[in-house]
Image: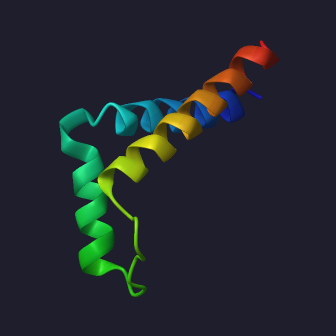
Amino acid sequence: MHLHFACVAIGGVAGILLALNFRDSAYRVYELLMNRSPVSPGFGFSPLLLRITGAVLGISLIAQIATRL
């Protein structure tokens, strides 16, 4: 039970930090995927999209923890 909360909390915090672009993380993830991915990302893929996705993921995971407490 506690391990589940810890894993969800880590994912939520990571999503929020990605959304806030902590230590340029959105651009680092973007460059990693552009340079090393075997599949070329399509049109519209950008650091902004990564930040929005991180925000949605982080908020939803933190809300999941809050509702289960």
Q: Residue at x 47, y 29 (%)?
A: 13
Q: Which residue is drawn at 23% across and 53% down?
A: 27
Question: Which image quarter is the N terminus in?
Answer: top right
Where residue 2 sits: x, y (%)? 70, 26
Where residue 30 sits: x, y (%)? 29, 61
Q: Residue at x 67, y 33 (%)?
A: 3
The residue most toward the top is 69
Comparing 43 with 7, the one in front is 43
Quadrant hosting residue 58: top right
Q: Count the labels in the image.
A: 0
Q: In the displayed structure, would residue 31 be above or below residue 26? A: below
Q: In this view, does 32 lie to the left or right of 51?
A: left
Q: Is residue 53 left or right of residue 17?
A: right
Where residue 41 sits: x, y (%)? 40, 76
Q: In the displayed structure, would residue 57 be above or below residue 32? A: above
Where residue 62 sits: x, y (%)? 62, 24
Q: In the displayed structure, would residue 42 be above or below residue 65? A: below
Quadrant hosting residue 29: bottom left
Q: Which residue is drawn at 68% across and 22% down?
A: 63
The residue most toward the bottom is 38
Comparing 21 with 67, the one in front is 21
Quadrant hosting residue 65: top right
